Amino acid sequence: MYYILFAIFIIILTLFLRFKMGVEPRTLVTLYLLGLVIFLLSFTVAEMPAFGSPDNPTFNEVPRRYLEKGVEETGAVNIVSSVIIDYRAFDTLGEATVLFVAIAAVAATLRSH
């Protein structure tokens, strides 16, 4: 039922913006895509668990495993180093690659001017 009302609202809004306000179709598509992104982000934030809730995904067994078995599984005495280098190495490599590409793009842009 709500989808039908939402579709009718979108059709009326499109007709109003297009013929009464003289808005270009390209601008309408941009506005609708922006509205869709805002709706999806708002919906995602509304569905997040409350701060400090035991249902929060950060309260799971992974950090406990890192602290309890990190030294014996990785051999690193420093827990932070064991997480970054052994457990999350692929993720860290991706982050380093993104940072390198960003720095290279900035350097190339500044050099061209």
Image (tube, helix red, strand yellow):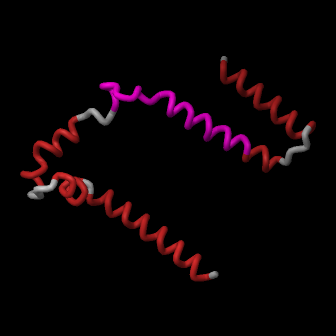
Is 96 part of what is drawn in magenta?
A: no
Between 46 and 22, the one lying in front of the other is: 46
Indicate whether 42 appears above or below 73.
above
- Residue found at x 32% / y 60%: 92
Between 7 and 53, the one lying in front of the other is: 53
Say whether residue 11 is left or right of residue 4.
right
* Quadrant in the picture for residue 6: top right
Indicate whether 19 appears above or below 52.
below
Q: Residue 17: where, in percent of width, then height?
A: 85, 38
Q: Residue 70: where, in percent of width, then height?
A: 13, 49
Q: Quadrant of the C terminus?
A: bottom right
Say whether residue 39 is left or right of residue 12.
left
Q: Main secondary structure of the magenta part?
A: helix
Indicate whether 7 appears above or below 85.
above
Q: Residue 38: where, in percent of width, then height?
A: 62, 38
- Residue found at x 42% / y 70%: 100
* Quadrant in the picture for residue 12: top right
- Residue found at x 67% / y 43%: 34
Q: Quadrant of the N terminus?
A: top right
- Residue found at x 44% / y 30%: 48
Is 39 part of what is drawn in magenta?
A: yes
Q: Residue 36: where, in percent of width, then height?
A: 64, 38
Q: Which residue is situated farthest in the left direction here?
A: 72
Indicate whether 93 appears above or below 35.
below
Say whether residue 71 is left or right of residue 18.
left
Find the magenta span and give its range: 31-56
